Structure formats: structure tokens, C-alpha cells
Image (cartoon, helix red, strand yellow):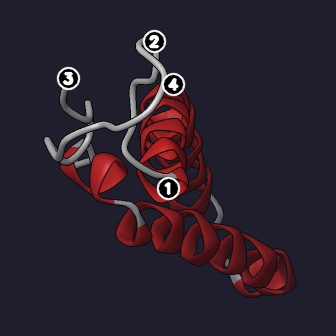
Amino acid sequence: MSCEVCGCAVIGRSDRRYCSGACRQRSFRARHAERHAETVRQALRQLHALESMMTGPFLRPYLQPLHAATSLLSGALGKDSVLTKHAPE
């Protein structure tokens, strides 16, 4: 039997799917990133739309939190390869 993540031989129980805890964790992270990638993309699109609507000097104090949130979400997309593949264009 071989590991579902890296393809290495799996030793131990017959129902074991991964060769190590690291591969099991990598699989878990990939599954959860795929589930939440669309939510992150939607949030980014909404933030960009809101930011484009907010113009004028009196709104400048409100833009800083939007820039911070956009940077945070963009950083999340950059860190994970599954999310990076599906980044908004």
C-alpha cells in the first residue's frame, strides 16, 4: 500500500492511508484549504468592490482597516498552494 500524499510505502495497519503524521496533516490542510478557498475569494472581491466605492478624504480613516483586511486575505492566498491556484484574477 502507498501513501495518498507522497506515494511512499505505508507500513502498519491495513487501513492506514498515510505514511506519517506529516502527510496526514498535509492532506488535512489541503482538504480544508479547498473548502474555504471560495469563501476567501468572495471576501476579497467584496473588499475590493467596497474599497473602490469609498472615495473622498472624509472616508480615508475607514480605508486603513480595509487595506489591512485585504492584505491579510491576500497573504492567506499566497501562503497556501491550493489557494494560490484559485486566486482571484
Q: What element carries label 3?
A: loop
Q: How far apart are marks 4 and 2 (CA)?
A: 25 Å
Q: How far apart are marks 4 and 1 (CA)?
A: 22 Å
Measured along the vertical axis of the image, is residue 18 above or below residue 57? above
* Tally of numbered tags: 4
Kindly indicate whether the residue at mark 2 contacts the one at mark 4 (C-beta within 8 angstroms): no
Q: Distance between the residues labelled 1 and 3?
A: 47 Å
Mark earlier in primary sequence (4, 3):
3
Q: Give the side of residue 22 with respect to residue 87, left or right.
A: right
Image spot of residue 61 (x, y percent)? 85, 86
Tell me, for residue 38, which label it has, or none.
none
Q: Distance between the residues labelled 2 and 3?
A: 9 Å
Image spot of residue 9 (x, y percent)? 19, 41
Q: Which residue lies furthest to the front in this view?
A: 12
Measured along the vertical axis of the image, is residue 3 above or below residue 35? below
- What type is the residue that disc 1 sits on? His
- What type is the residue that disc 3 sits on? Met
Residue displayed at 74% across by 87% down = 57
Q: Residue furthest top?
A: 15
Q: Give the side of residue 70 with respect to residue 6, left or right.
A: right
Residue displayed at 47% across by 68% down = 74
Mark earlier in primary sequence (4, 1):
4
12, 63: nearer the viewer: 12
Mark earlier in primary sequence (2, 3):
3
- What type is the residue that disc 4 sits on? Arg
Tell me, for residue 15, which label it has, or none.
2
Image spot of residue 31 (x, y percent)? 46, 30
Mark earlier in primary sequence (4, 2):
2
Provide the residue designation for mark 1.
Answer: 48
